Amino acid sequence: MIYSAKVMEHFANPRNVGELADANGIGEIGNAKCGDIMKIYLKIENDTIVDCSFKTFGCGAAIATSSMATELIKGKPLDEALKLTNKAVVEALDGLPPVKIHCSVLAEQAIKAAIADYYTRLGIDPTPIVGVIDNDHDHHDIGCGCDLDD
Ligand code: FES
């Protein structure tokens, strides 16, 4: 499998790793098939992500996409962070092999879950803002690389 230099670099030196002690939005997304788990921590002030971090138990592509995704949302207002697609994360990494695209969906969904958690803590129903979060997803239709297909 060929990975871009950017993927290898973010895998070797991931940015924003670890827990954020003062996070006020935390999202966790898991993939039941491959067992990967991604947790995103957000510190939000005035509807802006002032800091963020991640913990990923998963493959190299999951680590690289978490790292890049946190770089892309740091300093961004929530409405912009919600627009971050897995496609944009993959493009920022100069691509991923097709079978690893689903790993980047984890990062997109974990960010949405963390923003939903932030709104829930404020007593605001997140669903109209964030939409439905795809947890325990089963995206074998978009090229999961888990080799665990039924
Ligand atoms: Fe990378 Fe499933 S998230 S193999």
Image (tube, rainbow, N blue to C red):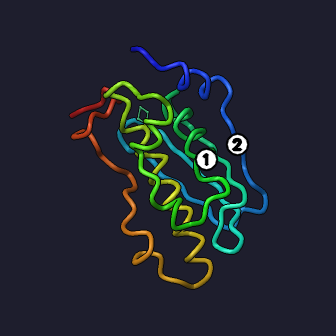
Dividing the picture into quarters, in which one does residue 140 lie? top left
Residue 134's place in the image compared with 139, above or below, is below
- The residue located at (72%, 60%) in the rendering is 50
Give the class, few, some or many, for how many residues have Cα within 10 Å of label 2's Cα (few <14, many ≥20).
Answer: many
Residue closest to the far bottom:
123
Image point 52% across, 34% down: which residue? 58
Indicate if the residue with disc 1 has its beta carbon within 8 Å of ligand 1: no
Q: Which mark is residue 16?
A: 2
Left or right placement of residue 88 versus residue 49 in this view: left
Direction from residue 21 to residue 91 in the image, left or right:
left
Question: Residue at the spot x=63%, y=72% of the render?
Answer: 47
Question: Where is the N terminus found, in terms of image quarters?
Answer: top left
Query: Identity of the amino acid at label 2?
Result: Asn
The image quadrant that residue 63 belongs to is: top right
Q: Residue at x 57, y 39 (%)?
A: 68
Quadrant, the C terminus: top left
Residue type at numbered disc 1: Thr
Q: Earlier in the sequence, mark 2 or mark 1?
A: 2
Which element type, helix, strand or loop, lies under badge 2? Answer: loop
Residue 26: give x, y in percent of width and height.
61, 61
On the image, which quarter does residue 12 sit in? Answer: top right
Whether the residues at callouts 2 and 1 have beta carbons within 8 Å, the answer is yes
**Quadrant in which ligand 1 is drawn:** top left
Mark linked to residue 2:
none
Q: Using the image, tell me which numbered label, if any, was put on residue 70.
A: 1
Q: Nearer the viewer, residue 11 or 26?
A: 11
